[in-house]
């Protein structure tokens, strides 16, 4: 397992470097002049040119790319915002926890509802529980998150006045964004859980367990669900990645000062350092999440353990 963990950890390095290069390239060739945005459209051309030189925008692409990668990954100098002059690291320290908290709450709601919903549908296949679960899943896939967010605001904030409409504070500020962001994930988890459980329930060892008189609850929880979790865990990792992207949009709708609003504001202002560094931090967070998912997958799937155990034995025999 240690070798498997180390292999997955090392894969993070090229992934983060690739994200850095791609985001830098996109921002470089994106229309818009940062100098005009910073100084205003009424600034003199001489002042604009001086600002471009100051920001390094007049250098060739590969020179700027090499300088950016060197500053970021060798000297660990993340720089400051071109517009606000605030150190980018300070902004990320303040905003990244809010994005992570919102993503975690959304994931807990999605998995806590979606997986039991899918298991219930599989256990009661072709019955009313199955039909209700799949209708709910279809609705979850069909409803756009941003539209659902607006409906939730109108109902719970404007009409009932139960929850705040925007901003940050206690846990109640994250309820509406999390509910708006979890609908699609609940549907995906329910459908995947149902499909995986149906494949496992039809297996011979499940039939054997039932024939031996094992209680149905134990058959489902200890035998079927454990083996069905292997493909479910894979989908969980993909859904967390989608949630992380969806949360950035929801932060804008609910005026939550997180990484989403930071990066979107940076894109609008052509604030290259903010967008580039923010994207790298999000890539690191997503890579760590996928690392945890891979470790959970390895813990559940005995084939991975056997693969690395046999590899270690072969090396010992070869060295011996």
Image (cartoon, helix red, strand yellow):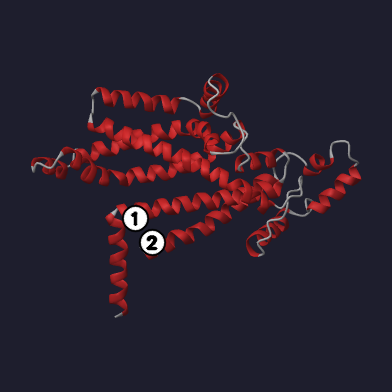
Mark on residue 4?
2
Q: Mark 2 or mark 1, which has the lower sequence index?
A: 2
Please identify the quarter of the rendering in which residue 209 is found: top left
**Which residue is painted at 30% across and 53% down in the image?**
301
**Which residue is painted at 29% across and 71% down in the image?**
314
Q: How crowded is mark 2: few (under 14 residues within 10 Å), some or many (20 or more)?
A: some
Between 119 and 275, the one lying in front of the other is 119
Residue 58 left/right relative to 212: right
**Which residue is painted at 56% across and 54% down in the image?**
16
Residue farthest along the bottom direction in this orientation: 320
Residue farthest along the left direction in this orientation: 212
Residue farthest along the top direction in this orientation: 159
Q: What element carries label 1?
A: helix
- Quadrant where the image shows the C terminus: bottom left
Q: Residues within 10 Å of mark 1 (few under 14, many from 20)?
A: some
In percent of width and height, residue 167 lies at 62, 35
Please identify the quarter of the rendering in which residue 210 is found: top left
- Quadrant where the image shows the N terminus: bottom left
Per the image, the residue denoted by label 1 is 298
Marks 2/1: CA–CA distance:
8 Å
Residue 47 left/right relative to 298: right
Residue 115 left/right relative to 125: right
């Amino acid at each position: 397992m240690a070798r498997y963990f180390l292999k997955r950890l090392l894969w993070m390095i090229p992934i983060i470097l690739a994200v850095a290069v791609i985001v830098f390239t996109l921002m470089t060739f994106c229309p818009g002049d940062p100098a005009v945005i910073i100084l205003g459209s009424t600034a003199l051309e001489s002042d604009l040119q001086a600002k471009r030189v100051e920001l390094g925008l007049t250098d060739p692409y590969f020179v700027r790319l090499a300088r950016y990668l060197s500053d970021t990954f060798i000297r660990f100098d993340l720089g400051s915002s071109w517009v606000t002059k605030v150190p980018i690291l300070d902004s990320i320290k303040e905003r990244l926890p809010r994005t992570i908290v919102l993503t975690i709450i959304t994931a807990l709601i999605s998995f806590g509802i979606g997986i039991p919903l899918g298991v219930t549908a599989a256990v009661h296949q072709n019955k009313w529980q199955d039909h209700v679960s799949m209708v709910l899943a279809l609705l979850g896939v069909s409803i756009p998150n941003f539209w659902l967010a607006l409906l939730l605001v109108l109902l719970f904030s404007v009409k009932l006045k139960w929850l705040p409409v925007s901003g940050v504070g206690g846990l109640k500020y994250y309820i509406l964004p999390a509910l708006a962001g979890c609908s699609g994930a609940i549907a995906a988890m329910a459908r995947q859980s149902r499909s995986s459980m149906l494949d496992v329930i039809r297996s011979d060892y499940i039939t054997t367990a039932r024939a031996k008189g094992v209680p149905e609850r134990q058959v489902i929880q200890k035998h079927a669900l454990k083996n069905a979790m292997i493909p479910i865990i894979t989908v969980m990792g993909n859904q967390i990645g989608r949630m992380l992207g969806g949360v950035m949009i929801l932060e804008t709708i609910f005026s939550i000062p997180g990484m989403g609003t930071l990066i979107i504001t940076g894109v609008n202002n052509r604030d290259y350092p903010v967008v580039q560094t923010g994207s790298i931090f999000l890539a690191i967070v997503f890579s760590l999440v996928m690392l945890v998912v891979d470790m959970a997958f390895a813990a559940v799937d005995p084939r991975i353990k056997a693969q690395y155990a046999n590899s270690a034995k072969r090396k010992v025999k070869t060295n011996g």
